[in-house]
Image: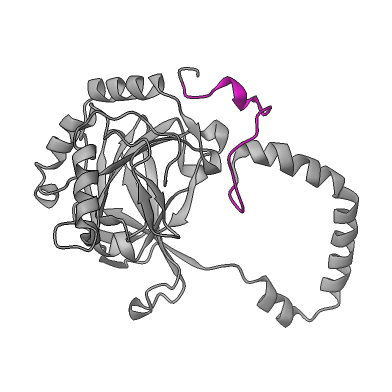
Amino acid sequence: MTQDGISATDSGVAFCACKGIRRCLKCDVLMGKDVLEANEPKKRQHQARYVALIQSIPKVIIVLFSSHKIVHHFLYDPETRLANRKDAEATSFPFPGVFLRESFISEEEEEKLICTMDQNVWNESQSGRRKQDFGPKVNFKKRKVRFGGFSGLPALSQRLVLRMQQEPSLADFQPVEQCNLDYHPQRGSAIDPHLDDSWLWGERLVTINMLSDTTLTMSLEQGLPELGLAEEVQVAVCLPRRSLVMLHGEARHRWKHAIRRDDVRGRRVCSTYRELSAEFLPGGQQAELGAQLMNISLSFAGTPIEKTSC
C-alpha cells in the first residue's frame, strides 16, 4: 500500500467488493465503460425515438413528467444546534442528536493511529471503502452473535475511550466494537444513506474523523410536513479533521446518515465505536452474552478480524 492509501491493485485490474446497487470508481470502469460502448448504437436509436415522442406530447404533460426531485438543504450549526437553510430563506429548526468535538485528537496521535492501522491489512469493502473490524461476528437477519476471532478493541483505543468518557454525554460509554474505514477519491469511496442496527448496537454511535475534512449528510426522505417541508430534507454536518462526532436520539434512529462521494476530497480514515443495546446489558435478555463481549472488548488487546458487520 502506498502512503496515500492506494494499493497496487487499484489500477483497475482487481475486482472490487461492491454488491447489488453499490458502486465505486473501479466497478464503474470495469463494468460501466464496456456496457456503455456496447449499447451506444441502441442508445442513439432510443434518443431519436425519445425526441420524436417528446415533440408529439403537449407541453403541459412534459412539465409533469420532467419535474425533478425536490430536496431541502440545510447546514448544521454545532454552536446553536440548529439546522439552517442553505438558500436565501431564513428557515431553521432544532436538530438534536448530534454532538461534535473538534480537535479531539492531536496531529501526533492522528499520525500514530494511521501508521498503526496501515501496518494491518485493509480489507476490501463496498462502495470503494476499505475496512478493519474489531468486534464480534454478527448475522443481523438471524440475530446471531459469535465471538469468532474477536480479541478486543486495539490497544491504542484505550486512551481514546477514556477521553470520550470525560465528556458528560459519554461518561458511561463502553464500546464493544470498533470499525475503521478508509475512504479515497481515487476509489470513488462513499457510504449510502442508512440507519445503523439497533438490535445489537445501542443508543450512541461515536466516530473519530481523520486525515481530511468531510461532510456527514443526514437525510429524512419523508420530509418535515410540520415545518412545511413535504419533500426530502438533508442536513449537512461538517466534520473537521481530527474531530469526534456522536449520533444519538433522532439523529441515530430517525435520520439516515451518509458520506457522499463528492465529499471525499482526500484520503479519509474514520474509526466508529458502537456500544451494546439494552437487550445485552444487565437486566436484558442476553445480559450474559453482553458481559462476555464487554470483557473481551475492554481488554484492549485486539487485532482486526477478517469479516465484519460494517
Helix, strand or loop for the magenta stretch, by majority:
loop
> Residue 307: where, in percent of width, then height?
45, 39
Residue 121 lies in what quarter of the image? top left
Q: Residue at x 73, y 42 (%)?
A: 31
Q: Residue at x 39, y 50 (%)?
A: 138
- In the image shown, does 134 or 63 lie closer to the viewer? 134
Looking at the image, residue 9 sits to the left or right of residue 243; the answer is right
- The reply to whether residue 169 is visible in this rendering is yes
Looking at the image, residue 189 sits to the left or right of residue 310; the answer is right
Examine the structure image and report whether residue 19 is included in the region drawn in magenta: yes
> Residue 176: where, in percent of width, then height?
25, 44
Q: How is the image coloured?
A: one colour
Looking at the image, residue 167 sits to the left or right of residue 246; the answer is left
- In the image shown, does 160 or 306 lie closer to the viewer? 306
Q: Residue at x 23, y 38 (%)?
A: 296
* Magenta segment boundaries in residue numbering: 4-22
Q: Relative to 57, say whether 120 is above or below.
A: above
- The reply to whether residue 78 is visible in this rendering is no
Residue 133 lies in what quarter of the image? top left
Q: Relative to 18, say whether 201 is above or below.
A: below
